[in-house]
Amino acid sequence: MNAAVKIACLLIALALLGYTVLRACNVPFTHDESYTYLYCSHDSFMEIISNRTTQVSANNHILNTLFMKLWQNSTGSSEIALRMHSILAHAVYLLFTFLLLKDLRSGFVIIAGFLLLNINPYLLEFFSLARGYALAISFMLVSMYYFIRYLEEEKNRQLLYCMITASLAVLSNFALLNYLAAVLVIHQLVIWLRYRDLRTNFQKSRIALITVLLLSVICYEPIRKLIRFNCIDFGGMEGIWENTVASQINVFLYEQPYDFTVFRIIDAIVLVSVIAYAALLLTKLLRGKMQRQDRNGFFIFGVLLLILFFNALQHYLLGSPYIVERFALFITPLYMLVLVHLLNALTGEKLALKVTAFVLLITFTSGMGLHFSKCANLSYASNWNFDADTKKMLLDLEKEKAVSGRQKIKLGVTWIFEPGINFYRESKKLDWLETVTREDVSNEFDLYYIEKDDQAKVPAEKKAIHEYPASESLLMK
């Protein structure tokens, strides 16, 4: 790899990291971030780890909540302070996507692959939010990198790094238990095929075994709480393709007004690429022509397929839903790595396939770049766009307080606005604003901040004084 490729990837990484920092500074705290801050991060470290928080919730992504508590106690409660760990996770993600790609056939494939892994607008959102998804995905890629290195060299240090970071991924988001299980299965299969000896297998599995035992002790109580309070209820019941894959395409499209044909094209690309890569790897395996890059792609592909298999198995055995949207976001980088390895492999084939691979790389990166340019924003998060105007509304509300001469304001709200408003009330010490509740807006309040659809519930004499298009909300008095 020449210096130009490294410089190009570095410039792309710095631009994307800058975008993440700007979003972390500007996007108002979202419903789920605020919920975590208000109802989880004020509890003790042990209460957070065991999920015995003020309100038991799947919003308590353990490492995320611990980091929020750490920043809150050390640097304050500004948006960027509470989101700092996600920004750092983005830097780690950028580094390890590069490390996972750096040995591919050409500089062009490396740069194109780096773009494909890094300009997904929905994925980028979470590197600027205080949620566990950014940490989980970054730790997963670090783990994947060391797992591949371990399978090549079998150094215990590499397996230790793999297991530690996989465990940290699980503690960031419990959905990554499927990733850890997939890694363990592949590890056992590889060791058995290489040595076919139980004693050797046990010796080479001690690190993994100890890690799993320690993680089980840590995770037992928080997962038990989630099950007991029925907090694991988000997902689909139709199937892997109908729920998991379709949801990843939908969130990638980022609510852009594209024709449904675009969805169908991406759906077909995913299906064809998975089948094509499986066929290509099988052909190379049977012919004994598997090279180092092919083996790396094979392991990544195996992890991806096992994750989906385990999720399907849980559905059939336990009735749990198929993972969707942000809960399944961690499979997107794995799929992108598979896609890049497929195209990289084709560049080493006959001329027609090589030309096809380069044309597809140019098409995919150009399409994603154009799509990202349409989606990029510094004002809202797509899952919580109703929080886009919270800070602006509070400034307007403070002006209304000054005009009215009131010492205190009692604000009625549509329930989804409650955590975000209370976060700013607490973090910015807005003592003039009474704690916002989820009390019905048909009751009497000084002012009302509501979704437009709730306007009919507000007392008839109240009139809108400010309208907020981004969140489709109104301030009324």
Image (cartoon, rainbow, N blue to C red):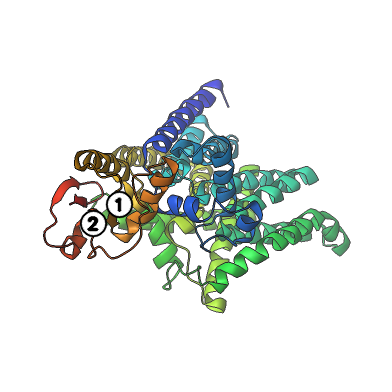
Which residue lies at the image location 68% right of the left edge and 62% below the top edge? 185
Give the number of the disc on residue 451: 2
Left or right: 299 in relation to 122:
right
Nearest the camera: 303 or 330? 330
Distance from Cα at disc 1 to Cα at disc 2: 8 Å
Residue type, numbered disc 2: Glu
Q: Quadrant of residue 145?
A: top right
Mark 1, residue position: 386
Is residue 417 something that shows in the picture? Answer: yes
Which residue lies at the image location 50% right of the left edge and 29% below the top edge? 9
Q: Nearer the viewer, mark 1 or mark 2?
A: 2
Nearest the camera: 256 or 275? 256
Left or right: 246 in relation to 7:
left
Is residue 351 something that shows in the picture? Answer: no
Left or right: 301 in relation to 34:
right
In the image as oriented, which residue stretches furthest toward the right? Answer: 199
Pinpoint residue 37: horizontal percent, then vertical percent: 49, 50
Q: Is residue 20 above or below residue 462?
A: above
Which residue lies at the image location 52% right of the left edge and 74% below the top edge? 315
Q: Quadrant of the N terminus?
A: top right
Mark positioned earlier in the residue sequence (1 or 2): 1
Q: Is residue 472 above or below residue 21?
A: below
Q: Is residue 372 above or below residue 253?
A: above
Determine whether the residue tagged by mark 2 lies in a helix, strand or loop. Answer: strand
Pinpoint residue 456: horizontal percent, then vertical percent: 15, 64
Give the number of the disc on residue 104: none
Nearest the camera: 348 or 181? 181
Residues at discs 1 and 2 in contact (Cβ within 8 Å): yes
Pinpoint residue 136: horizontal percent, then vertical percent: 56, 50
Pinpoint residue 25: horizontal percent, then vertical percent: 41, 35
Residue type, numbered disc 1: Phe
